[in-house]
Amino acid sequence: MTTTSSLTFQLVLERIAEEIERTPARGTPADYIPALAACDPRSFGMAVAELDGTVYGVGDWREPFSTQSITKVFTLALDLAREGDELWEHVGREPSGNPFNSLVQLEYENGIPRNPFINAGALVVTDRLHSRTADAAGELLSFLREESGNPALDFDEEVAASEAAHGDRNAALAHFMAAYDNIDNDIPVLLDQYFRQCSVKASCADLALATTFLARHGIRADGTRLLTLSQAKQINAIMLTCGTYDAAGDFAYRVGLPGKSGVGGGIIAVVPGRCTLCVWSPGLDERGNSVAGVAALDRFTTLTGLSVF
């Protein structure tokens, strides 16, 4: 089936939702954040946003959830727009092959994280954005509100506090990189910004809309340019190769789209020049990706023929 109209998008989503409903295995919610552990793993929502802002969805597509690592995409875009290629002197662009919170590579790579989507890399990006804005988390929230058209988006203070209470590993990553002069701000300030960034609550509809600037090759919802064509390409490429932790190869094989997941169960994906997607189901696999979410995106690209390949 090839998508030829918005009606077809809606029909595809409805078919996917029906198939997912019949799937018994849904994974397990993240258990180290109480607010996430309490989520029903059988919850499911999915939205598609066209470039003109039209959104279609099924299931719990308007239910806010914890975005977690999905926000790393937007923080990266906001910082890259400000400092350009200088950013890549402080963070790499290669898949890590290790868990998202690993410290292993930092020591033998002199405090330079492998990519912006593992925790160490995201800390560097947040640090650099904070140096340029004095409020990285606030800058992110304003951007998400504007691009989604939802001024009610906000931080979840309970989730941020829970992450801070279990944030020793992230603190270790930050201190280690600071020892290599790759962190500029005070560590407690940086960690507060980072945990708040990850605590944003948004729905599939909100995130699909907020991501459309990447499908429009860097153009924001108001028609202004955030990223150059090259920068938009770079972010999409890094999403494809690094966006789903150490399962990026399997995700590219199954889905064939730039994507970014979060342990809240959400995944965003980009069809350049056509549309963006967000799917949410809080049951995760052993690598931290939504079981139903990956399956749904796999079915979307299979049914529609839309991929980057």
Image (spheres, rainbow, N blue to C red):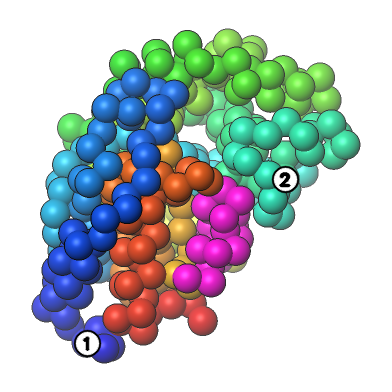
Res. 100 in view: yes
The percent position of residue 267, horizontal first and vertical second, equals 38, 52
Circle 2 is placed at which residue position? 114
Q: Please state which of residues 233 and 168 is positioned toward the viewer in this rendering.
A: 168
Residue type pointed to by label 2: Arg
Q: Is residue 227 left or right of residue 161?
A: right
Is residue 240 in the magenta section? Answer: yes
Circle 1 is placed at which residue position? 4
Residue at point 36%, 36% (across, down): 29
Residue at point 44%, 70% (across, down): 255
The percent position of residue 238, horizontal first and vertical second, equals 59, 58
Q: Which mark is residue 77?
A: none
Q: Please state which of residues 115 and 222 is positioned toward the viewer in this rendering.
A: 115
| Position above or below: 70 against 9 | above
The percent position of residue 130, horizontal first and vertical second, equals 55, 26
**Category of crowding for the residue at label 1, using alpha-carbon neighbours closer than 10 angstroms: few (below 14), some (14–19), many (at least 20):** few
Residue type pointed to by label 1: Thr
Q: Secondary structure at mark 2?
A: loop
Q: Is residue 64 left or right of residue 255?
A: left
Furthest-front residue in this view: 24
Magenta highlight range: 231-254
Is residue 253 in the magenta section? Answer: yes
The percent position of residue 302, horizontal first and vertical second, equals 36, 79
Q: Please state which of residues 36 and 268 is positioned toward the viewer in this rendering.
A: 36
Give the overall secondary structure of the magenta segment: helix
Residue at point 21%, 67% (across, down): 19
Q: Secondary structure at mark 1?
A: loop
Which label's residue is closer to the chain start, 2 or 1?
1
